[in-house]
Amino acid sequence: MSNVINDSTAILTQTLQNLYKEEKKYKTILEKIGNIAVFAYDSKLRNIFWNRACERVFGYKKEEMLGKSMEKFLKSSIVQNEFFNKDIYSSYDLKPVSFMKKGGSLISLHCDFIKIREEEDEKVFCFCVDTSDIFSQREKERVVKDSILHMADLMIVMLDEEANIVEFNKFAEKLSGYRKEEVLYKNWFDIFIDCEDKSKIKRVFKDVINGENFHWGYENEIVCKDGSKKTLSWHNSIIFNDDNERVVISVGMDITEKIKTQKSLERMANYDYLTSLPNRNLFEDRLKHAVFVAQRDNKKLMAMFLDIDNFKSINDTLGHRIGDKLLQEVAKRLQNSLRKSDTVARFGGDFFVLLFENIKGVKSAVSIVKNIFSLFEEPFLVEGHDIFVSVSGGVSLYPNDCPDANCLLRCADIALHNAKKEGKKGFCFYNSKMNDEIIKRVKLESYLRNALKNSEFFLVYQPQIDLKSRKIIGVEALLRWMNPTLKMIPPLDFIPIAEDTKMILEIGEFTLRKTLSQIKDWEKMGINVRAVVNISSIQLAQGNFFDLVDSLLKEYDVDSSQIGIEITESVLMKNMDRSIEILNRFKDRGIEIAIDDFGTGYSSLAYLKKFPISRLKIDKAFIDDLPYDKDSVSITKAIISMGKSLGMEIVAEGVEKEEQLEFLIKEGCDQIQGYFFSKPLLPGEFAAFMQSFDYESFFKKEKKREALGIIT
């Protein structure tokens, strides 16, 4: 048998071995080889593959062979007795092997065996060529050659030493769009390779033609007739023609779709789907590299966290589609403002992160941050809406604040948290004190998670006095937390954490239950007062909040007139339409609603009249400086006038001095609470206070205290 048969079969078997490992497409390809019988078996001699040519050559149908033992079928001692003899397999040398056909007759074929290891088993593929027919040697070579060349789904080309095309199979025609006669004897590089890739691909060809490196699995693009590009994975070999000249046989698999899928997956893994900005994954890679370069070259970096203020309100009022488009516009504006060396990424939601490389120092950093904030001075035009947004920012510097990438991000996050805590619409540079605050917060959160279970919460009640009747008409229920380790923790320290972690839902229900239970206990003692509880935005946003309150009133058998709720202005404005709907349900149920800390937020008559509000509570900040501070006097008068015009009762909180009380009485305030009359009291203390309360006695007591110089 000529070397051409052996060489060609060698190329086929080696190519298929690589394809089997890489693509699992061997079954489709081997099924369609018409003139080569291919079967396969495992280490226990069970058949695992049987192509159509096998059915014709051996007479057995596929269903008769798959999964069956091949011991009787395999008559050659080479196969039966030397399964693990390494000299038998993958030698690319056709060996005569005898097989038993269906019916009992023997057939002798020339075969090559390749062994493939998969997981913990070994599989053997056998390629069989019938050389016992009447064909001439040249015809036999042609049959084998054609069988190889016209395999399905593989582009096969043969190139001479100058890279001129001497063979071009049918699949190559189909894939490239060129007919064989259009490319035959023309240079491969001139037709199929892009200019920018030519020098690189020519080096590969030189390696192959010299037998130095066959570049198995090498990938490159070819240019098709219509100008489109296809990516192929190549397997190259050398044979010698009749004139003893070297010929390169290149077998290429079209992996264009695979590459597209890989690129798509890579993009999904590294870029934000909405804005096309880098995501956290890619940003962190770039940051690590930037820190490495900065460390090597003694340069400075800046990381900046940027968060859009009140973005949820935009989604709630204009819809998520507008919100998404706003994020896209913000991304564009940020991207367009940066240098090529800088990076802006979106970490999700309305949260952006920026990286600035090679900055000069703190002054330069401040200037950059101010430039970023100036981008938000102009509105964003989204579907006809002019949307003004403000942002909060947190900034950290390398190496000033942190020695590595992870620390740099953590410090920027801490600085952002601090900026938002200070009122948003601004930025903070990281300092070490902020880290101490975060550690304190983490510690508090850890204790807070067990506070309910450990019965560490309790309620105190501050009396509310009606200035006309001069009687106690209600109390405000106030939550307190006593931890065995941390002792008494102020509400301002733990309530924000409870809201951030949603623990406020459980704590809020505890407060409601405890208050209603206490109302019933006082009722049994003959004490009838209304108790008001403070409600957070998290509770109000809870879909079943009204139903919860309604069911608790029934459970504790408390009349709705004995309970009230207090909500801050900011809570009302987070979702105005939803707030109005829920509060109207409370009003219809007979539960009175008060706005707490009025004057510190929107304080607009236009929005105020939309809500079913019964009471306005003037914030303590305005009461403290009465009656001497002109601004406090003006604001307090305006709030009282505004509330009265809407038929609301006015409550002043934080009243501590007689002159404050006198001013409030004169201006028509309805009710007060504060240390002038009483601090918040435990249930038993309040019962005693209620029973002994004498309005006039407080004034005498206050005069005496003033004389003694012990003003609270």
Image (tube, helix red, strand yellow):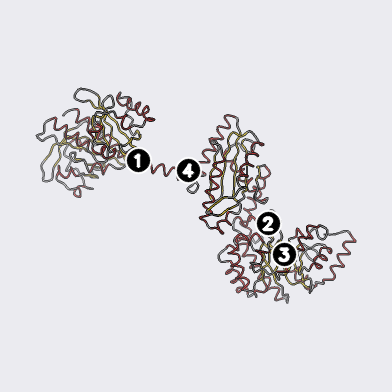
Whole-angstrom CA distance, mark 2 to mark 1, is: 64 Å
For the C terminus, give its image quadrant.
bottom right
The tally of labels here is 4
Q: Where is residue 130 in the image (x, y as percent from the top left)?
A: 14, 36
Which of the two labelled residues, at mark 4 and mark 1, occupies the earlier sequence position? 1
SS category of the residue bearing label 2 = strand
Which of the two labelled residues, at mark 4 and mark 2, occupies the earlier sequence position? 4
Q: Mark 4 points at which residue?
A: 270
Q: Where is residue 664 in the image (x, y as percent from the top left)?
A: 80, 66
Name which residue type carries label 4.
Asn
Q: Mark 1 points at which residue?
A: 256
Q: Name the residue under label 3.
A: 617
Q: Is residue 333 above or below residue 546?
A: above
Q: Where is residue 55 in the image (x, y as percent from the top left)?
A: 17, 45
Which of the two labelled residues, at mark 2 and mark 1, occupies the earlier sequence position? 1
Q: How crowded is mark 3: few (under 14 residues within 10 Å), some or many (20 or more)?
A: many
Name which residue type carries label 1.
Thr
Residue 211 appears in which quarter of the rendering?
Answer: top left
Which of the two labelled residues, at mark 1 and mark 3, occupies the earlier sequence position? 1
> Cβ–Cβ below 8 Å for labels 4 and 3?
no
